[in-house]
Amino acid sequence: MTLGRRRFVDRLGRAALALSAVLAVAPLAGVVVWVVARGAPALAAERGEGLALLLSALWGTFRVAGLAAVLGVPIGLLAGVLVAEWPASPLARASRRAAALLAGVPTLLVGLVTFELVVARQGHFSLFAGAVALAGVLAPHVALAAEHHLASARPELRDEARALGATRLGALVWVVLPSAAPGLAQSALLAVALVVGETAPVLLTVLGSSTIGRGLDEPAALLPLEIVSAATAPSAARQGHAFACALALVLAVGLVQLGARVAGRRAKEAR
Amino acid sequence: MMPSSTGPRSALPRKRAPSVLGDRALALASAAAGLALVLALMFVVATLTEGGARAILSGHAPRLDTGVGAERYLLGTVVTTLGALALAAPIALGTALFDVELAPPWAKRPLSRLLDAAAAVPAVVYGLFGLDVLVPGLRWLGDPILGPGAPASAGVGLLTASFLLATMIFPTVTRVARAVLATVPDTLREAGAALGATRTEVVALVVVPHAWRGLLGALLLGAGRAAGEAVAVGLVAGGRPNVSGSPLGPGETAATVVLEGRFGAESPAPLFALALALLGIALATSSLGRILVARSARRSGAQDLTAAEVA
C-alpha cells in the first residue's frame, strides 16, 4: 500500500471511531435529557392523590432497598471475607463460583424463585418478600467486589500483622479494613443503587398497592411498580404520574450512586 | 492424684482465649455467608428444574395454556437479543476504542460520566422511554415505508424491543470493553507505532487482535442482560405471541411471558420450563463473557477486571 493510501485509510478509521462515539452519545444523552424534560414538569404538576401516591411509593422504595441492603450486604461482605481469607478452602471456591453465576442470573428469575420461596408459602405478597428478592440480587455483586477489595488491600500488611501474632479477626479489623473500608462501602452502595430501580423481582413479590402500607408484611407501593401501572394507562394524567415517578426513581438511584462516588474518592485516597 | 489442671499443661489457659473465639466466630460467619450463596444458587436451579421437569412429565411442556408453543417465546428472546447485539456491538466497541485509543483528554471525562449516568437509569425507565419516544418514532418512520397495515405499523414489536435493548446494554458493553482495552500494554502500541504503523493500523492490527477475547466477553455480558430483561421489553414488544415470526411484528420473549404469566390463568409448570430455558441461556452467555473478560485481563498482566468493573 502506498503511503497516501495508508494515510487515507487511517483518516477513515479515525473518523469511523469518532462517528461511533457520536452515535453513542446521542441516544444516551437523549435518555438522560428525556427523563428530566418529561419528569420535571410532571413532578411539579403532581397534586393531591398523585403526589401522595408518589411519596408513598418513594417511601416504599426506600424501605425495600434498605431492608434488602440489611439482609444482603452482610452476606456479601462475609462471603468476600471467606474467599479473601481462606482462598484455598472448597467452600470458598464454591462460594466464589456461586457468586459469579448468581450475578448472571436474570433478576426476573430471582424474583420468580423468591415468589415460590416466600410469597407462595406465606400466601400473600409483601414488602419483606421483595427485600428478600433484592437481597438475592445484590449479595453476589457485593461478594465479588468485597473479595476484590479485601484481597487487593495490601496483602503483605496482613501477613506481617499475622506474623506478629495478631489473630485473623484482629488483622482483618485493624489492618485490612482501614484501607479496604472505603472501597467496600463504594461497592455496597453501588449494589444498592443497582436494586433500587429493579422492577421484575418486586413485581413478582411486592405486587404494589394503592394504599400506604405500614407493615413489612404487606404489599406496598414502590416507584418502579407505579411506573409500570401508570405507563400503560390511557389517561394523560396517569401518564404524567409515570414520568414524575420515573424522574423520582432516577434521582433516588443517582443519590445512592453519588454516595458511592464519595466513598470511591476516599478509596483512592486510602490507597 | 493431682487434679489435671495443675499438670504439665496447666500453663495453658483452660478456656479458649477471646481472640481465638473471635477467629472462630469470623470463620463460622463467613462460612455461613458463603454457604448461603451456594444454597441460593442451588435453590434457583432446583426450583426451576423441578417446575420444568413437572411440566415435561405432565406432557404439556412445549405448550402454554394459550396454545402457543414455548419455542415461539424462546425465538422472541433470541431475535431481540441478537438484534440488540447487532445494533449495539459496532457502536459500543467503536466508542470504547475511541475512548481508549483516540479521544482527546478533555472528551474522556464527560463521556465516562455520561456512561455512568446512562447505566444508572433503571430498566423500567428505559421501558417508559421506549413507550414514549421509540414507539411513536418508529411508527413515524415505518408507516410511510411499510404501509399502515404492516406488522410494525403500531410501532411496537420485537424490532422496537431490539432498539431499546441495544440502548440499555450499551453502557455495560462500552464500560467493560473500555476496561479490557485499558489492560492492553502500552508497549505493544508503542512497538506498532515505532514500526511505522498509523493509529488505525495500531488499533486494527495490534490492539484488537490482542484484546478480541475480552471484547467478545463484553458483548456476551451485554447479551446475558438483554436476554433476561422483562419489564422494558414487555412495555414495547406488543404483548402477544409472535405467530408470524417476523422480527418486525409484535411478540413476546421468554422473560416477558414468565413475568406476565405468573399472574394469568396459566398453570405455572410450563412457565417454569420456559424460565429454566431462560436461565440456561443467560447463565451460558454471561459466564462465558465473564471468563473471556477475566482471561483477556490476565493475559495482559492486569489483576481482575470482573469484580471491579463488571459488578
Image (tube, coloured by chain):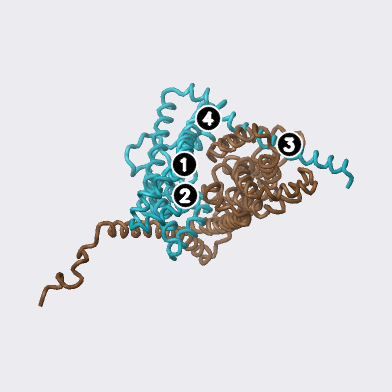
Chain colours: A cyan, B brown
Mark whose residue sits in front, 4 or 3: 3
| Residue B199 position (above or below residue B66) | above
Q: Which residue is mark 2?
A: A149
For the residues labelled 4 and 3, say whether their Cβ atoms are less than 8 Å apart: no
Dot 3 or dot 2, earlier in sequence: 3
Question: Pointer 1: residues within 10 angstroms few (<14), some, or many (20+)?
Answer: some
Chain letter of mark 4 equals A
Q: From the viewer's side, name the closer residue of A111 and B17.
A: B17
Residue type at numbered disc 1: Ala
Q: Which mark is residue A243?
A: 4
For the residues labelled 3 and 2, say whether their Cβ atoms are less than 8 Å apart: no
Dot 4 or dot 2, earlier in sequence: 2
Label 4, label 3: how many angstroms apart (C-alpha)?
Answer: 31 Å
Chain letter of mark 2 equals A
Label 3, label 1: how many angstroms apart (C-alpha)?
Answer: 35 Å
Dot 4 or dot 1, earlier in sequence: 4
